[in-house]
Image: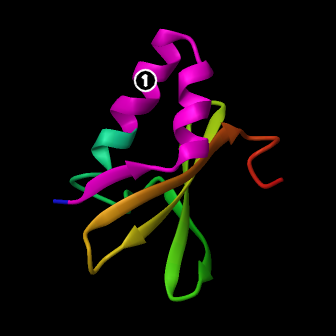
Amino acid sequence: MYFVELSTNAQEFLEKLDNDTKKRIEKRLKNLEDNPVPKDSKFITRESDEMIFRYRIGKFRVLYKVKEVRKIVLITKIDKRERIYN
């Protein structure tokens, strides 16, 4: 079992969304507690010994790191597809 943690930027982005969208994203993020690398996630790159993944939720994308030692899924960024990598 992993713990899902949101960065300040990810939390602020979620707060700006309407309630339905926010709940849908939070529900999908909660799934990462049981399976931090689901089959619909994609490995993006490695940054200082941490693997960074992309998770697609409708028109939104989530970038996150899996910290194996501490059993944490750190959500670093949530944004629309066209802006996620900027």
**Residue at the extreme front of the image, as rendered:** 8
Residue at the far top: name it. 19
Q: Nearer the viewer, residue 29 or 17?
A: 17
Residue 39 position, x and y percent, is 41, 58
Residue 8: within the magenta?
Answer: yes
Give the residue pinned by disc 1. Answer: 24
**The image quarter in which residue 38 lies:** bottom left
Percent from the top left, x then y, of residue 32?
A: 32, 51
**Crowding near the residue tagged with mark 1, few <14, some 14–19, many ≥20 C-alpha atoms within 10 Å:** few
Magenta region, mostly helix, strand or loop?
helix
28 vs 86, left or right, is left
Q: Is 15 drawn above or below residue 38 in the view shown? A: above
Q: Residue furthest left?
A: 1
* Residue under the point 61% across and 81% down: 47
Q: Which residues are magenta?
A: 2-28
Measuring from the top left, give residue 74's x and y in whole percent. Answer: 43, 59
Q: How is the image coloured?
A: rainbow
Q: Amino acid at mark 1?
A: Arg
Is disc 1 placed on a helix, strand or loop?
A: helix
Q: Is residue 20 above or below residue 46?
A: above
Q: Residue at x 16, y 59 (%)?
A: 1
Magenta-colored stretch includes residue 70: no
The residue closer to the viewer here, 14 or 41, is: 14
